[in-house]
Image: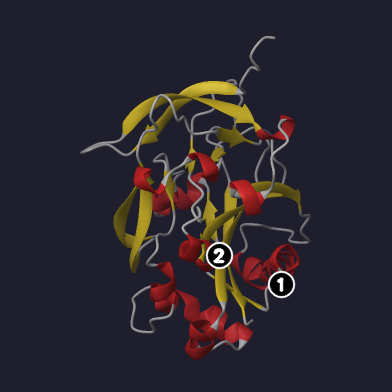
Amino acid sequence: MPEPTPYCRTELHYAGAETPLPIATPIWNGRTVALPGWETCGFELIRAPSSVGDFTNDNEIAGTHFDEIELLAKSLTGCDAVLFYPPLLRSPERAAAQPDLNPIELVHSDYTESYRAMIEDPGHPYHHILEPSMRRAGITVAEIRQAQRILTLQLWRNVGAPKVDYPLSFCDARTVARTELVPIRISEYGGQKTEFDAFAVLPPSEDQPHAWYVFPNMTPDEVVVFRAYDSDRDTTGEPFWTPHVSFRDPNQGADVNPRTSLEMRAICLFRG
């Protein structure tokens, strides 16, 4: 029986000793594979239409879309409360003003085991990013510390044309060992002091490859939900990370569009 054909083969940039290492990698079409869902492999494509008329309007995102994402996060997780980081809109226009808003081409996962301690510390530089959302939800630092479980989901939406130059690819978390993750300090991001740790991902071994997937031609009515941190999994040693990376899609032709995407981060609190 012939081997299935991947969506594409391309180079992904993994962490190296000094500079990123380009590694030839097959990427599979997640639309044609029976994936088990975000709770198992770390990510999932879902249909989630929005009533937002203009995804470049920050006020509309902070109002209408926060409400939509809060309802979605609660329905996906059963959590009691949801906090947010400010939305990240990546587009050529935003990247021209702030280079951090270009697509990220280093294989990474956004948070390490230090995540919970970070968001529980009101003196941490990152905490000021949470404060507007805490006021919105009426959540105090004490309530964050008392949470039985903290689960952070990232929600990625293509809000531009379906054919994009640098889509986001997602790795099955079960195929990435903790020993393949290297903490790196992010001192500043998007012009703000952050001082948090993310994971850069080392290249896989030949006998234990990483499994990568993409969802081609996403529309604004679709969202990829992927896990960034889970205190329960942190405790048990199970993967709470979901490596992801932008890559130059070799299947798109000359008429491809620069990516315009919206990223939301929902911090789900469980009171127990």
**Which residue, given by chain and number where applicable, does mark 1 sit on?**
67
Q: What SS does tag 2 mark?
A: strand
The residue depicted at 49 percent of the width and 62 percent of the height is 236
Q: What SS does tag 1 mark?
A: helix
* Spatial CA span between label 1 and label 2: 16 Å
Up-down: is 76 above or below 212? below
**Depth check, front residue: 155 or 272:** 272
Q: Residue furthest top?
A: 1
Query: Which x, y percent locates residue 171?
Result: 53, 40
**Which residue, given by chain and number where applicable, does mark 2 sit on?**
152
The residue depicted at 56 percent of the width and 37 percent of the height is 167
Identified by mark 2, the residue type is: Thr
**Depth check, front residue: 93 or 203:** 203
Which mark is drawn over residue 143? Answer: none
Query: Which x, y percent locates residue 40?
Result: 63, 49
Up-down: is 97 above or below 13? below
